[in-house]
Amino acid sequence: MSTPTGRWQALHAIWRLLFSGFLFSTVRWLEMLAMGLFAYRVTESAFIVALLSMLRLLPMGLFGALIGALAERFDSRLSLMLMVGTSLLTSGVLALLASMGWLSIWHLGVGCFINGICWAADNPVRRMMIGDSVGAQRIGPALSVDVGVNNVSRVLGPILAGLLLAQFDIGGVFWLGLVLHSVSLWVVWGVAPDHKHPIKHPLSLLGPMREGFALARQDDRLIGILSVTAIFNVFGWPFTSMIPVLASDALHLGNQDVGLLASCEGVGGFVGALLFASFAKPAWYGRIYVGAVVVYFTTAVGFALAHSVTLAALLLLLNGLGAVGFAVMQTTLMYRDSPVAQRARLLGVLTACIGLGPIGFFYIGVLADVLSPPMATLAMAVQGMVALALTRRYWLKFF
């Protein structure tokens, strides 16, 4: 068991990785809400709002396993710097386009896709570095702190998005993103060089990718982890794209108030991360993982039907608690239960399952246009619960 002193030493060793993740996540949530509100104002289409979120997630499905295989071959610090630097350039281009009055929806789509590629590298690169720095015994608390810090960004991001949209329009959002990515790049520059020798494979990249998927298929525990991840990302996570739509239409909130309401999810996630880091025992990880998904689906339904801002805020607090329980445990369980030599590629497979999210974002967008945003959210949650029940035989393996 880790002592308080041991935990502090572990966190001190990875503070740059934690802080860079916080900055990167702040820009992500800042942009996602701002882009959603901007796109809904311009097009009045819930489908377009969901499509932008889909494009940000699409690279995970397309390139997640490939990035996991690549991560074994290249220096982790340089890979992380490339990831941050690319996002910095993207924010800079979007800021210039917005300031010149040339910004179009398709520019946002391209920006979402490029930054989505960088996001897809987070598990097999930055979080792999965290795990290697603290070791398998401390990975749970370390990732709880990482997710908790990132949930602070889920509070700051939406609030800042609402304020900047109200005062400076969307250009101010991208200029702030440029500044934050610049700070993040400086922080990553100070990360200690990677002293381990990157793995050299005699096979092509397709070999390690195939090995990762084959290894996952042979272990029911890994199948369970990947199944729950896929279910959450197809049927659960797309709910986030409906938050600005539901808050604008059903609760009649303006941009600034939508930002404040959306930040409640981050508050709940931050509190949950602190609780998991302090009290969660390894024997509970599997139950927390599945239980968190159930909480997420239930609160999404409640939010879709809520007509009170107070009730909506409370439900988003609980929703954030569910989201963080899921986020912490999916990476922790995969890191813990994977063979050491195959961790990076299996984290790449996990990222590929996260990348199934675009299917859900496209689906909820279609349902929202055909039915209504509240009914679309309800339908997705019900289908997610059914899928979770159907995969019970696999996720019970890691209970």
Image (tube, rainbow, N blue to C red):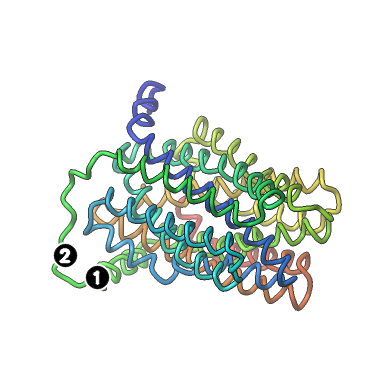
The image quarter containing residue 351 is bottom left
Q: Where is residue 16 in the image (x, y as percent from the top left)?
A: 37, 37
The image quarter containing residue 19 is top left
Q: Position of residue 186 (x, y in %)?
A: 36, 42
Q: Position of residue 198 (x, y in %)?
A: 18, 54
Task: Tell me the element at label 2.
Answer: loop
Vertical side of 277 occupied by 232: above or below: below
Q: Mark 1 points at which residue?
A: 205
User: 10 Å neighbourhood of mark 1: few (<14), some, or many (≥20)?
Assistant: some
The quarter in which the N terminus is drawn is top left
Q: Which of 8 and 81 is in front in this view?
A: 81
* Extreme residue in the front direction: 100
Q: Distance between the residues labelled 2 and 1?
A: 8 Å
Task: Tell me the element at label 1.
Answer: loop
**Left or right side of 87 for 236:** right
Q: Residue at x 64, y 50 (%)?
A: 161
Q: Which residue is drawn at 58% across and 63% down?
A: 100
Q: Which residue is drawn at 48% across and 42% down?
A: 22
Q: Residue 357 carries which label?
A: none
Q: Which residue is drawn at 48% across and 51% down?
A: 178
Vertical side of 264 occupied by 384: above or below: below
Q: Residue 201 carries which label?
A: 2
User: 10 Å neighbourhood of mark 2: few (<14), some, or many (≥20)?
Assistant: few
Query: Which amino acid, by three-letter code, is at mark 2?
Result: His
Query: Which amino acid, by three-letter code, is at mark 1?
Result: Leu
Vertical side of 326 occupied by 360: above or below: below
Q: Do the residues labelled 2 and 1 touch (CB within 8 Å)?
A: yes
